[in-house]
Amino acid sequence: MAVVFDRPHAFCDIPLHYCPGCTHGIIHRLVAEVIDEMGIEGDTIGVCPVGCSVMAYDYFNCDMIEAPHGRAPAVATGVKRAKPDSFVFTYQGDGDLAAIGTAETVHAATRGENIVVIFVNNTTYGMTGGQMAPTTLPGQITQTTPFGRDPKVQGYPVRVCEMLSTLTGTALAQRVAVDSVPHIREAKKAIRKAFENQKEKKGFSIVEVLSTCPTNWGLTPVEALDRLRNDMIPYYPLGVYKDIDAVKEGE
């Protein structure tokens, strides 16, 4: 009988700890599929900081390193410079990457560090109870914005891909989502592109993945997917914000 669906070898065969309806598992699988397809499991090193991704090191068969909160790009920089022939990626949430880790993210990009950053944006601090994150939408109710985020008080959300696309060292800045099969396929293409960029030594690549957090949003898994489509995507439009190959073609 032909095998039409199987677990990637780079993805450990153990139950995930994530909440029902959380899309971290989908994103994990996409990364693992790319590692398998490129045949780089033995040469790949992942870096995970604090957040809902804190236990991702349990789910990948490649080498994994735990980093302090927000410091994954700094740790990945050291790993890549020490082992330049390895494939190095970070797996980070929005509270981690766009708040305490903003400096590490921005400066790794502006230096053009040849790493891949997988940025999971669910507009909340998931692991610590649902506080407002840098990406929390205007009007969104969280544990620390019980009346909704007010831009006059808490400021506006950070659009990470748009910001990093302005930096010379960024080779790829693309935003994708995992709310539907077509979007999941596009997300995998983006992750593959990012890893190919690293193979070809093109510089810093970030793939922002719009994700759900049913528990902290107070929604069912189905309702959470609807919120992603109806609220998040209009504020965070999907697409390629910078592709160094396209820039060169246009010159």
Image (cartoon, rainbow, N blue to C red):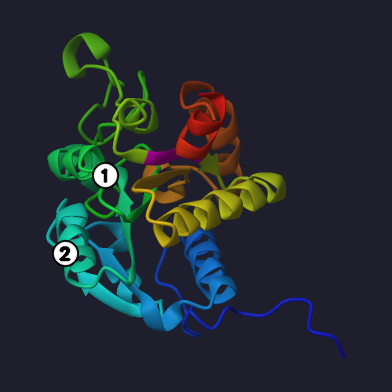
Q: Nearer the viewer, mark 2 or mark 1?
A: 1
The span shown in magenta is 171-175
Q: Residues within 10 Å of mark 1 (few under 14, many from 20)?
A: some
Tell me if residue 61 can be seen.
Answer: no
- Residue 230, percent from left and from top: 58, 27
Question: Reading the chain from its start, which is encountered first: label 2 or label 1?
Answer: 2
* On screen, residue 60 above or below 119: below
Which disc, if any, is residue 112?
A: 1
Q: Is residue 52 left or right of residue 96?
A: right
Pointer 2 residue: 67
Disc 1 residue type (three-letter): Gly
Based on the picture, tell me whether residue 152 belongs to the magenta stretch: no
Q: Residues within 10 Å of mark 2 (few under 14, many from 20)?
A: some
The residue at the point 58 percent across, 55 percent down is 188
Q: Quadrant of the N terminus?
A: bottom right
Residue placed most toward the observer, 111 or 241:
111
